[in-house]
Image (cartoon, helix red, strand yellow):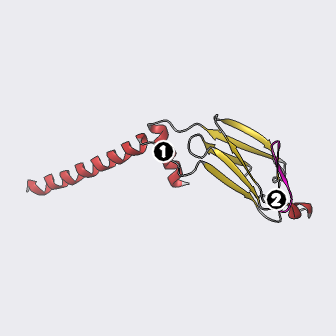
Amino acid sequence: MTAPLSGKRLVAATLSLVLLGGLGWAALAPIEAVSHEELFEIPKGTSARRLAGEEIEILPQTIRLTLGLNDVLVFRNADSAPHIFGPTLIMPGQSFRLPFTQASTYSFQCTAHANGQLDVIVDPAPAPGWERLRWRWRKLTS
């Protein structure tokens, strides 16, 4: 009669070890990104719609990046009019790349927004341990 109980314990112990191993990997394994670029496109017709008085939001008000993972902001202007991002004029058909090397909050002038401003929050890369585990969990659930 003790044989089924020891079999159940063996299964429980095996599942526990697999779960702990998976959590350990998620907390300690390096995070690798295929591309460091986060691309946003200003769609065709944006300026015409704005001039017609339409309030459209084509880009998020706040863009969140992470150092070492997606730390290069790329804007592609598919509109027929130029747009300003910070001190840069992005002509129709052009792209603009802005790499970030420091974690901080940045505010830029942006003509693609109705209020004329865009905020970029650059987070530090998640450290090994609980921080990296929380980061992976947020990515899985968002």
> Where in the figure is residue 51, as x and y percent of width and height?
91, 61
Q: Is residue 127 magenta?
A: no
Q: Secondary structure at mark 1?
A: loop
Q: Is residue 68 visible to the viewer in this orientation of the structure? A: yes
Kindly check if marks 2 and 1 are in contact, taking CB atoms under 8 A apart as contact. no
| Position of residue 38 in the picture relative to residue 10 (left or right) | right
Which residue is label 1 attached to? 31
- Magenta-tinted stretch: 79-89
Pointer 2 local density, CA inside 10 Å: few below 14, some 14–19, many at least 20: some
116, 16: nearer the viewer? 116
Q: How many marks?
A: 2
Q: Amino acid at mark 2?
A: Pro
Residue appearing at x 65%, y 45% in the figure: 72
Residue 59 lies left or right of residue 22; in this view the side is right
Tell which tag, 2 or 1, sits nearer the viewer.
2
Residue density around tag 1, few if under 14, some if 14–19, many if 20 or more, within 10 Å: some
Which image quadrant: the C terminus? bottom right
Residue sitting at 67 percent across and 54 percent down? 39
Q: Residue at x 30, y 50 (%)?
A: 18
Quarter of the image holding residue 5? bottom left
What quarter of the picture does the N terminus occupy? bottom left
SS category of the residue bearing label 2: loop
Of callouts 2 and 1, which one flags the residue occurring earlier in the amino acid sequence?
1
Residue at the spot of label 2: 92
Q: Who's the residue at 50% across and 53% down the image?
A: 140
Please state which amino acid type lies under the numbered disc 1. Ile
**Residue 133, x across and y down, in percent:** 46, 43
